[in-house]
Amino acid sequence: MLRYLLGRVGQALAVLALTFTAAFLLLQVLPGDAIMIKFMSPDMGLTADQIAEIRASYGADRPLWERYFTTVGNFLTGNFGFSIQAGVPVSQQLATNLPPTLELASLAFLGAVILTILLATASNMVGMEWLRAGLQSLPSLFISVPVFWLGIMLIQLFSFQLGLVSVISPGPVERLVLPVLTLAIPISAPLAQILMRNIDQVLAQPFVAVARAKGASRNWVLWRHVARNAILPTLTIAGVLFGELLAGAVVTEAVFGLSGLGGLTYQAVGNHDTAVLQAIVVISALAFVTINLVVDLLYPVLDPRLGTKMGAAT
Amino acid sequence: MTVTPILQVDDLAIAYKTGDREQRVVHGVSFSVAPGEVVALVGESGSGKTTTAQATLGLLPGNGRVESGIIRLNGTDISRWSQKRLDSIRGAVVSLIPQDPGSSLNPVRTIGSQLAEVLQIHKRGDRRAIQARVIELLERVGLTPAAMRAQQYPHELSGGMKQRVLIAIAVALNPALIVADEPTSALDVTVQRRILDLIDELRRESGTAVLLVTHDLGVAADRADRLVVLQNGRIQEQGPVKDMLAAPRSAYTRRLLADAPSLGKPRPARAGIDTQDFAIEVTGLTHDFPVTGGEVKSFRAIDDLSFKVRRGTTHAIVGESGSGKTTAIRSVVGFIKPTAGRILIDGVDLTTLRGEKLRRFRKHIQLVYQNPFGSLDPRQTIARIVEEPLLNFEPIPAADRARKVRDMLGRVGLSETFLERHPRALSGGQRQRVAIARALVLDPRVLVLDEAVSALDVTVQAQILSLLDELQKTLGLTYLFVSHDLAVVRQISDTVSVMHKGRQVDGGPVEAVFGQPDSAYTRELIDAIPGRSLPVLGVPVLAGPPELPPRLSP
C-alpha cells in the first residue's frame, strides 16, 4: 500500500515537472514579451538602451537555460516572480484572485455532484417510461450547450424575465447562484450520463438478481448494491472533468464580470505576462493532479478488490 | 394423493418484447413440485428452462411478461402479484441459487453482510441474533473459520466457496422451494459434486423442495426425482427419472441421451496408431510466472510436462481450472516462452524460434478457441474471417483465396450462402464451424482445440465432434485437444495427459488412463462425473456404462 502511495505521488510530481517545463518553453518561444509590450510603446518614449537596461533588471537578457533554472528555484521557494504589467509580485495577484475562483469552482463541483445524483436517482425512481427516457436524454442536451451561452441565457431568464436573481449589486450569495449553475450544469451532464449508464450496467449484474431473490425492493437494491458499484467509474471521470471546470471558470467569470483567475488569465495572455501565466498553469496543474491523486487513493477504499493484491484462497 | 404441491405451474406462456414484436418463448408449460421433491427442468439453450424458473420467482427480465397461465406457490397464484408483494415471499418462501457464483455476489461488500442482508430484509431478529445466525449458516455450508470468512470479500474466495455462500443465502430462512438455476455449471467437476451433495444434504434436513434447472442430463438423473424435458419452450416429456430414462417416449429425449458424450463411448482404435512418426514432442516443459509482493518469487504453472503425439492422432490435455492446461497450450502454439523444456513440432524446436521465423511457423499450428461468440470479429463477414489468415502469409491471388475459402466452408458443412453473413446471424455451432474453417484454411499440420466444444449444447457438440473426426481422417490432422470434460476426451482422443496443479498426474493411451488410473486424482475426477444413475436400458446408442458429461458452459 505504501509503495502504491509513493508511486502515485511520484507520478503526480513528474506530471507537475513536465507541465512546468512545457509551459515555460512554450511561453518563451512566443514572439514578443511583456517588457516590450509595456515599455516599447512610443508613449513611454524610452530609448533602446533604457529598454535593454530594464530587460537586464528583469533578468530577461539571460540565456534560456539560466532563466529556466532560476524560475524553477524561485517556484520551489514559493516565489512566483513579478507581474510586469501590474508591477506587483505574482503571489500578491494570486492572493486576491485565487480565492474567488476556488470558491466558484468548488461550489460548482459540489453543485454538479448534487445535480448528477438528483438526475440519476430521478431517472431510476420514476415509474413512467416516457419520463425516464426524457430524463436520460437530458444530459446530452446539457453537453451540447456552450458555457457562455448558458450563462447569458440564465441571466436572461432568472434576472431579466423572472427577476429572481438581481444582477445589479447582488448580495454575496445571490452573486454566486447563476455563475455556479452555469458552471455546474455542463459538468453534471457527462457525469450523470456515465452514472446512469453504470447504474443500468450494474442492474444487469447477476448479483442484483440474487439481491432481488432475497426479497430486496428495487430501492434497497439501488442504494445498497448498485450505488457503490456504479460510482466507481464515475469517480475517474469526475477527476478528469475537473480540468474542464478550470477552463469553464475563465469564461464564466468573463460573462458574469467576476474577478478571479479567469480575469487574471485573460489580462496576462493579452499582455504576454509570462510570469503570471507560468504561475497560473502550475497552479491549475497542481489542482488537477491533486484531484486525480485523491481519486486514485479513494479507489481502494471503495473497491476492496484493489486493496489486496492476493488472489483467491482455495 | 391430495398433497398440495409447493409449486404448481399451469399452462404458462411467457413472451419477450424485442422492439415492437412480442416473441413467445414459453408455450403452455405445466408441471408441479411436491413438498420435499426435486424436479429438474432439462433442456438446451433456448429451451425456456431458465425463463420458466425466473417466472416462478417473479424475476423475469424487464422485457419479459407472463402472457397467460398460473403459477401457484403453496396454493396461491402469484403470477399477477406486484413486485412489492413478491418481495415479501422472495428469500423467505422461495429462494434462488444462481448460475454463476463469480458474478452473483456484490464485489464491494463482505460475504457476511450479504448473508445477513436476507435476514435483515425479512426482519429476522436484531443485529446480534442476525450475526449469530450468519456464523451458524457459514459453518453449516462448510465455510470455516466462519467469523473470519464473514469478513472476507467475494474476490478472496474460490468459485466453490462463493457458491457455498449463495447456498447459505438461499437456505437462510428455510424456504419451501429453492430454485437452483444451473447451480454448478460454472464449477469444476469435483467441486460440482461437493456442491450438489451439499444442496442434497440441506434439502433433506429441512424438507425443502428444489426446482433444479440444468442442461446436464447426468446431473438431473443423479439428483432429481422427476424430470421435465423442455425444447423450444414446450414440454417434450415429463415423469419420474427412472421411468423416463429407461424408456424415453419423445424423440427429443432419446436424441439428448444419444448425443451426450459418455465415458462408455470410447473411440474405436485406429490403424496407424503405432507409427513412430510424432507430430508433437513436448519434453520437460516447465513454466514459472513471476509473483509480485509475496513470500515466493514465482509460481510454477507447469512442472515438467512431457508427452508425444503421433501424426494423425488426437492427444488430450485434461484438467480442472488452474491445472496449467491453458499455459501448456499457449506454450505449444508459441505465444509464450517456457522457462524450460523443448517443444518439437514436426521436428522443429519451437522454443528456439523468434520473431519473424516464429510467426511464419505458426502457419503449421493453428488454434480454435473456446468461445465461439468472442473469437470472431462481429464486423467482418464470414468470407473475410476465413480469408484473413491467408493474407498474413505468402501472397495468393484473390481468385484462389476465394476458392480456398469456399472449399473450406464446404468442408466444415457450411453452404456458400454463409459467405456474406456476419457472425451475429450464426448459431454457436455454426460459429465454431467458421472458427475451424479459419484455422484449417492455412493447411496446418497441427490443430490445437482449446475447450472448443465446451460452450455448445450436447447435440451441437456431438455434431462438431464428428466433424472434427471426419476432418482428421481426410486431412491427416494432428489434434491437441484441451478440455475439462472427461467424457468428451474419451470419445475423441487416442492419448491423454491428466494435469493437476501444474503436474501431469496421469498419461498414456486413453483406455489405460481411464480404465486403470495411476493417480488418486484421476480416480476422483472420473468418480465425480455425474450421470452414474443413468440406466443402460432403452438407450441403444450407448455401449457400456453410460455416463454423461460433467458440465457444459451455458
Image (cartoon, coloured by chain):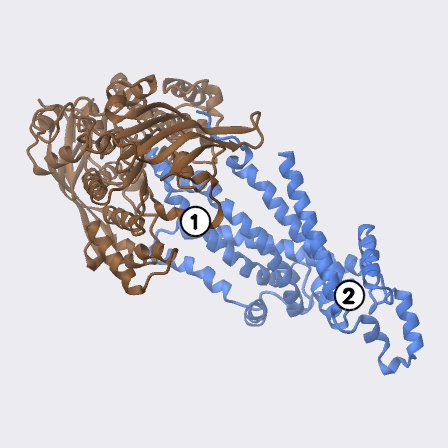
Chain colours: A blue, B brown
Quadrant of image for the N terminus of chain A: top right
From the image, tell me which residue sits under label 2: A274
Give me the residue at 76% from left, 66% from top: A28
Q: Amino acid at mark 1?
A: Arg
Disc 1, SS = helix
Disc 2, SS = helix
Quadrant of image for the C terminus of chain A: top left
> Residue A59, how many percent across, how many down?
88, 64
- Quarter-of-image position of residue B407: bottom left
- Tell which of B320 and B437 is nearer to you: B437
Q: In this image, B115 relative to B510: left or right?
A: right
Give me the residue at 62% from left, 57% from top: A243
Q: Are marks 1 and 2 in contact (CB under 8 Å)?
A: no
Asked if residue B425 is positioned above or below residue A219 in the image, the reply reads below
- Tell which of B424 and A84 is nearer to you: B424
From the image, tell me which residue sits under label 1: B359
Pinpoint the chain carrying mark 1.
B
Tell me the crowding category of disc 1: few under 14, some 14 to 19, or many 20 or more residues within 10 angstroms, Cα based.
some
Q: Is residue A174 visible?
A: no
